[in-house]
Image (spheres, grey):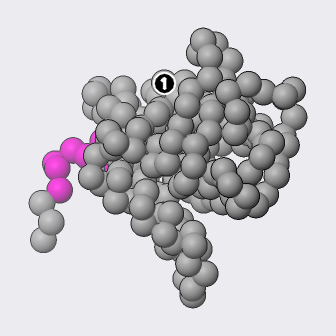
Amino acid sequence: MLDYPEEDFLSSALCAYRMRTGLYSTPTLCRDWQFGTMGDGRASFHLIGEGDCWVHMRGIGGPIHLVAGDLFMFPHDDWHLISGASTLRGTENRMTMGTEIPFTSVICGYVEFIAGRMNPILSALPPFILIRGIDALPSVDSLSKLLLLETKNYAIGTRCVIDKLVDALFVMVLRQGRSNCLRRPQQCQRVRLRSGSPN
């Protein structure tokens, strides 16, 4: 039998709030493009498969450059755009699909909690989480590569496999990001008690 920690607060909290994950889209873009995934109350993320792009957010002092293998998460559904250039052309989504060189491929996914959008799990996280591919833990790196591979594989069961991979990737991102909830297990314990889940 597996020897689980006696008190796995994060697992208890995630189960209590009934996490659900999935993908918005997996676009391959070229030339003039920019888009965001905010507005539906979900936490979202972008994993860069090939090429590079820029993340634009308010209040961070300037765009952030991403390259293949980087993962950027928005825990609070904050306004953002990712684009193929360091400057934006307005604030509207503009997508040019194709593999004309240079091109960028992106996996766009989300995390939500069925038991309520407002919960201490996401509230404990910073405005954004950036994990560079070159700095990723082996678990994050392996899951990211599996997710990138599976999105190109249209086999039976692909959707189920992708959902499970995104589930696991979100937890591994929390581990690497050292969220407040992980640093302060008593906070996750309060989450569990408030949710009414058993001890």
Q: Confirm whether residue 10 shows in the render.
A: no
Between 156 and 198, the residue placed more toward the observer is 156
In the rendered view, tell whether residue 164 sits above or below residue 32. Answer: below
Dominant SS type (magenta): loop
Quadrant where the N terminus sits is: bottom left
In the rendered view, tell whether residue 115 sits above or below residue 132. Answer: below
Q: Amino acid at mark 1?
A: Pro
Q: Which residue is mark 1?
A: 126
In the rendered view, tell whether residue 1 sits above or below residue 199. Answer: below
* Element type at mark 1: loop
Circle 1 packing at 10 Å, graded few (<14), some (14-19), many (20+), is: some
Q: Residue 9 in magenta?
A: yes
Residue drawn at the location 58% of the way across and 43% of the way down: 52
Q: Residue 35 in magenta?
A: no
Q: Position of residue 105 (x, y in %)?
A: 62, 55
Q: In the image, 69: left or right of 37? A: left
Q: Position of residue 57 (x, y in %)?
A: 66, 23
Residue 107 position by quadrant? bottom right
Q: In the image, 154: left or right of 178? A: right
Magenta segment = 4-11
